[in-house]
Image (cartoon, rainbow, N blue to C red):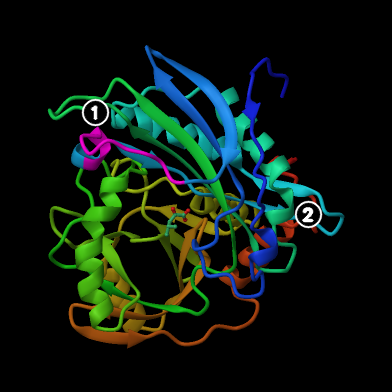
Amino acid sequence: MKTTLQIEVKKTDHSRIHETDFDNLVFGKVISDHMFVADYVNGEWTDLRIEPYAPLSLNPANATLHYGQSIFEGMKAYKNDNGEILLFRADANQKRLNESAARMCIPELPEEIFMEGLLQLLDLDRNWIPNKPGYSLYIRPFIFATDDYIGVKPSEKYKFMIFTCPVGHYYSKPVAVKVEQHYTRAVEGGTGAAKAAGNYAASLYPALLAQRQGYEQLLWTDGKTHQFIEESGTMNVMFIINNTLITAPTHTGTILKGITRDSVLKIARDWGMQVEERFLSVEELEKAIQQNTLQEAFGTGTAATIAQIYKINIYGTDYGLPSKPADSFSYRVLETLDNIKYGREEDSRGWIIKV
Ligand code: COI
């Protein structure tokens, strides 16, 4: 991308890379050396810079701390066998960030600031990208309000930042999930489709209750009837029943438009698989388990990749799901996605940017 952007770069004089144990990465704990920052002041994004990763100084009256105007993205970069950096579907994340921004009264961030800031940051911290199978660089772009003001109104000032973390698996083994019958993640007209910090905050308590009972995550249901499956707390969810891939549609505005979700659906359709984007009722899911027609259940997400579900609790009954043959769709689609991300397979869909 041709750009006229001026990005001031201040490099760290103390890289932490040699203190980092790349063999024992805990997801989200290790942060690379630098961060990209831009400020929104007087109606424009300005002061673009890359600087050493460091704490921020915030006033206690900072609007985000009180009213939660904060959105984020998650994406990943990989290293291929030639040491080149492959960035997966960053354009889709950039678009989704601006969709979240519109819903949360946050000003649009120009594509070139997002992309140029990201590419320069990745180039500078390229040594932080792990090159082992299953490992990648998780990238966290986010925008938050920076007005110091007590009162409920959209902030006039914002900060856009990107930092990155070398990571391994988010879920190192299959997960157990529980159908939520009482609490609600999203309702029509709400903010469910936005990647807004507050959505995650609101999900913590119900998820904690489920975790105390031994389930890693919830299967959120619709806010009105709690009879239809929407998504999970950290990922979209998909089911294969009678050879048909079923996942919740996004038109109600209650589902996060997952980029892994979209990628899996595109691959499934390319492979000629029957795909239905529709709400699956809890009753239909339970029947499919009882009648042995549920072949697969899995989550999809940037952090989670393809997370196998081994147990589902439906209204108090635990259903263990049978283990799957090695050529099951979810294994094959994970392998195909990994092959594209690590540059082992041709990127025929234009999903990869080489940095
Ligand atoms: C992601 O998948 O990127 C997310 O933001 C979800 C979170 C569990 C890390």
Q: Which residue is mark 2?
A: 343
Q: Would residue 51 appear left or right of 194 to someone viewing this image?
A: right
Q: Is mark 1 within 8 Å of ligand 1?
A: no
| Magenta stretch encompasses residue 287 | no
Give the crowd class for mark 1: few <14, some 14-19, many >=20 residues within 10 Å: some
Q: Name the residue type under label 2.
A: Gly
Nearer to us in this view, 15 or 269 = 15
Q: Position of residue 87 (x, y in %)?
A: 67, 45
* Residue at x-position 73% and y-position 68%: 132
Give the crowd class for mark 2: few <14, some 14-19, many >=20 residues within 10 Å: many
Instruction: Say which element carries label 1.
Output: loop
| Magenta stretch encompasses residue 64 | yes
Q: Which residue is mark 1?
A: 148
Q: Name the residue type under label 1.
A: Asp
Q: Position of residue 221 (x, y in %)?
A: 23, 60
For the C terminus, the image quarter is top right
- Quarter of the image where one finds residue 237: bottom left
Q: Nearer the viewer, mark 2 or mark 1?
A: 1
Residue 10: assigned label: none
Q: Position of residue 293 (x, y in %)?
A: 42, 78
Q: CA distance from mark 2 to mark 1?
A: 46 Å
Spot the residue most to the right.
82
Location of residue 147 with respect to 143 vertically, above or below? above
Q: Is mark 2 within 8 Å of ligand 1?
A: no
* Residue at x-position 13% and y-position 58%: 225
For the N terminus, the image quarter is top right
Magenta span: 55-65
Q: Would residue 287 appear left or right of 97 to someone viewing this image?
A: left
Mark 2 or mark 1: whose residue is earlier in sequence: 1
